[in-house]
Image (cartoon, rainbow, N blue to C red):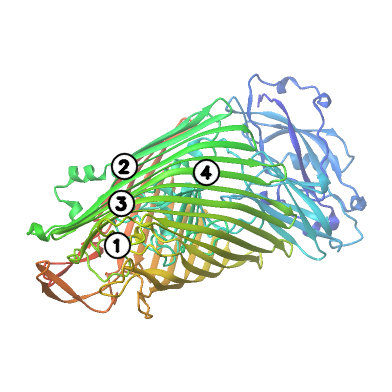
Amino acid sequence: MNQRFINIVAAATVLHATSNAMAQDASPPSESEGTQSAAAAPSAIPSDSEKPPESDQAKPPTGKLTKPPKLVHFESVSAPAAQGASLGPTSVGLEIAIAADGKVEAVQVLEQAGEPYDALAKEAAEKFLFEPAEIDGQPAGVRLKYRYVFTTTSILSETKPSNVVEFSGQVRDKISGKPLAAVKIELDGGRLQAVTGEDGRFRFDAVDIGKHSVLLMGSSFTPVGTEEELEANNKYDVVYDVELQIEKVPDSERADFELVVIASKLEKRVETVAVSSEQATKVAGTGGDAIKVVENLPGVARSSVGSGALVVWGAGTADTRVYVEGVHVPALYHEGGFRSVVHSDLVRTVELEPGGYGASYGRGLGGLVTVGYRPLAAEGYHGSISVDAIDASAAMRGNIGEKWRFSGAARKSHLDRVLSAVTSNDVGQFVPIPQYWDAQLRLGYVPSADEAIEIGTLSSSDTISRSFVQADPLDTKTESKSTGFHRIYVNYRKTANDGSQVSVVPFYGTNRLNIVSKFGGIPAELTNNAKVMGLRASWSGPLHDKVFATVGLDTEVEFNTISRRGSVTTPPREGDIRVFGQLPDDQVNADTWNTVQAGIAPYGQLDVSLLEGKLHVIPGLRFEPSMRGGSRFTPPEGERPAIGYRNQDAFLEPRLAARMTLSSRVLVRGAVGVYHQPPLSEDLSPVFGNPQLGASKAWHYLVGSQVRILEGLTAEVTGFISQQSELVTRSPLPSPVQAQALIQDGHGRAYGAQIMLRKEMTAHLFGWVSYSIIKSERTDGGSTTYRPFDFDQTHVFTALASYDLGRGFEFGSRFRFATGYPRTPVIGAAYDARVDGYQPVFGAHNSVRIPNFYQVDARFAKLFKIGKTSSAEVYLDVQNVTNQKNPEELVYNYNYSKKSYITGLPILPVIGGKLTW
C-alpha cells in the first residue's frame, strides 16, 4: 500500500502491562479504565529534534490536521516473570504509522529498554486500532510518537501490598451527569496521573494509603482540586461532578439541556435523575418543547386542558415558584399548557424540586422550578426556525467580536386559525383555545473567561376563553382570561481561582391579569396590574476541603393596582362549593385598591462532607423580614378619606438536608424545612378580602432513595409529608365582619409517595415509568374536618419510550393515566327569584370526582443532516391517538336536571418541522 503519513506528537499517553507476579489480576484495560496506568508515572515524549528521518513513503502531505487519531483498542501484554523483580516502571519509546483506516501500518522502536521489553511493546502496538486522523476534514495516514510503559511490582508477594489500595472513579458534567472523556487526573502534584476514557472513568491500581491531593484538568472546565483520604484494605470508587464551560459544538448536535429532579447542589457524589434535551424533545405529546417534559415526572399532577397550572405534591397552583436565571416569573407554561414561556433553544437546565429545597429560595409553600440559560458563546452564528400546527418560533444567537455575545427567540401561536381552517366546528365551545406569544433577548459582555455580564428581557402574553353555549343566550356561560409579564434584568457572574463564585441579578418588570366571567346576567371582572423588582445576590465557595458554603440575599418588592367588580363570590377560589356556569351570588360590589409587599431575606447554607464524601449534611437558615401595606384599611364609605395601613413580619426558616451513599448502587436522602408564603394581593381588598392577612406557613418532610438496578436502569422512591397552616379561606359567616370576607384559619396536608423507573439511552432506546400516589386535603373557614383539595389527584401514572430506528428515523409513544379532580355533586335545584334562575343544591363537599383521564400519544420524526452543522427535522406528534373524550369539567343545564362534561381535546395530529443551523 502506498500510504502517505504526517508526523504528529501525541500527548503523554501511557498504557501499561503488568508483570507475571500480577498476572492473576491482569486484564486488558477497557475505556472505562482510562488510558494510563495508575501506578505508572508519565514519561516525556521525545521532542521533534529526536525524530528519525522520514522515509520516502512517509513524507508528510500538505494540509492541516483537523482531527488527531484516537486509540480505540489497546493491546496489553505481560512482562516475563524474571523481569518482575524490578521495582520501577520500564518504558519503550515507539513511533507508530497509522493508516487512513485506523490500522497500524508499521511500528519503529525509538527508545530502547532492552529485551524482551522492546519486542513485546512493538508486538503489542502493532495490534492497536485507532479512530482515523483527518487532514483538511478527510481521513489520512499519520505518524505519532507513543510511549509504552510496563509497570512492575515486587515478585515477593502474590497479592497487592496492604499499604496500597485501588483508587478509581468517574468524572461527569455537573449539570447533565454525562461522563467526561480526556480529563486528566493528577495525584499529589502530578506524581501519579491518569486520563478518563469515553465513559468518564479512571483507575489507579496502587495508591499509598493516607491523604492525597487530587487535581482534575480538562479543556472544557476550570481545573478543580480536592483531597481524598484512602484507608487500608479498601477499594475506593468516587464520582467527581464538574461544571463545564461553553462547549463549542454545532447546535444541531447539542444536547446540553438537562432536566434535574430534586437536585441538591452537592459538589461530589451527586446522584440525580437527568433527561437530556435530545431525549426531552422526543417525548410524545410535548410538541418538541423540552421544558414540557416536567409534566411527565413523578409528583406532578396533570393539569386540565386550558390550564397552564403546575400542581406539585398537592400544593396550590400559586404555591410553586418559578425562576428564570434568578428572575421570578409568574408562570412556567402558557395558558392552555401547550408550550412553556421560554424557548427551548435558550434553555440549558430546568430543576424541579417539589419540596424540601434549600435556604436560597422561599416565599412559596409548594415546589420550586429554576430555569437556567445556555451560556452565551462566541462561536459564530446559529439559529433555528420551527413551525407546526400550534405555533411558529425562531431563535438566533451569535457574537460580535470575542467579548460581545447575543441570543434571542420569539414565538407566536396560531392554533386558533389552524382549527378554523380545518374544521367548521366551534372547538372553543368544548376546549379553550389559547392565543399567546413570548420573546426573550440577551446581550452579554465577557471580559474574561471567568467573568460575564448579561442584560436580558423576558416577555409573555396569553389570552384564553372557554364557553358553554345554550339555546337561550342568557344561559350561555363564558369565561375569558388574559395574562402577561415583562422582565428586564442584569446578570453578573464571576468565578475566582479557588472555585468560588459571585452572582448578582437585579431585575424589574410588570405583571398583568384580567379575568372576565359572565354566567347569566351578572358579569364579574378582576384586573391586577403589578410592578415588580428584585435582587438576588450570592457567594458560594469552599471554606474547607470538606465544607462548601453559600451565602446570599434574596429581595423582592411588588406594587399592585387592582380593581374588581361583580359578585362577591366571582371569580371563585379554592374551597368554594360551586359548579362551572353557576349563577353568581346576587351580592354585588366593586373596589379599587393598591398594595405593596416587600421582603428582604439574607440566607446561608453549608454543604459538609463526611465519611470520605459518602455523607453530605446540608444545614441552611433563611431570615426574612417582610412588609405589607395598602391604600385602604376599610371599605370606602361616602366622602370619608381612605386610611392606609402597613404591617410587618419577620420569619426564621431553618432547613436541613442530607444525602448518603450506601454503596455504588444505593443513595438515600432526606430533608426537612420551614417555608412561608405572603398573601395574594387580590385577597387584600377591604371589600372582597381582608387587608390584615398575613403569611401562610408550611413544613416539608421527605425521605427517599435512588437505586441503580442495572447499568442504565435506575429506580427512585420518595415519600413526603407537607403540613400547611394559616391558609386563607372564605369566611363561613353569611354576613362577614367588615373587611373580613376572607379569614386565615385554614389548614392543609399532603402526603404520599412517588416512584420512577428509568431506562437510559442504550441501544437506541430510552424511556421511563413514573407513578405517584398523593393525598392532598384542606380545611375550610370555621371547620376542622379535612376534605379533598380541589386539585387533588390520588393516582398519576406515566409510561413513555422513544426508539431511534436509525437513519434519522424515530418513534415515541406515551401513555398517561390520572385520577379525576374532586367536585361537589348537585343533588337538586331551587328557583331563585332574585336572579331569575335556578340555583343548585349541593351534596357533600368534594365527595365525587370527574371521571379518570386516559390518553395515548405518539410521535414520528425524521432528521435530515444538511452539511456539517445544519439539520432539518420533520415530525408528526399525535396527541390523544385513540380520540378519548376525556371529561375536564362538570356542567349542567339551566335547571340542573341534566349533567354533562366539558371534554378535552380530541385527536390532535400536530405536523411540524424545525430547521437548525
Whole-percent x and y of residue 108?
79, 32
Q: Mark 3 points at which residue?
A: 878
Q: Is residue 349 above or below residue 680?
A: above
Q: Name the residue under label 1.
A: 687
Label 4 amino acid?
Pro
Q: Quadrant of residue 206?
A: bottom right
- Element assignment for label 2: strand
Residue neighbourhood size for the residue with mark 3, other residues' Cα within 10 Å, grouped as few (<14), some (14–19), many (≥20): many
Residue at far bottom of view: 785
Label 3 amino acid?
Val
The residues bearing labels 3 and 2 have C-alpha atoms spaced at a distance of 15 Å
Report if residue 764 is visible in the image: no
Q: In which quarter of the image is residue 70?
A: top right
The residue lying at 48 percent from left, 57 percent from top is 627
Label 2 amino acid?
Asp
Pick whichever of labels 1 and 2 is earlier in the sequence. 2
Label 1 amino acid?
Val
Nearer the observer, disc 1 or disc 2? 1
The residues bearing labels 1 and 2 have C-alpha atoms spaced at a distance of 41 Å
The residue lying at 81 percent from left, 42 percent from top is 42
Q: Nearer the viewer, residue 705 or 455?
A: 455
Residue at far left of view: 472
- Element assignment for label 1: loop
The residues bearing labels 4 and 2 have C-alpha atoms spaced at a distance of 32 Å
Q: Are marks 4 and 1 in contact (CB under 8 Å)?
A: no
Q: Residue 391 carries which label?
A: 2
Whole-percent x and y of residue 545?
75, 55
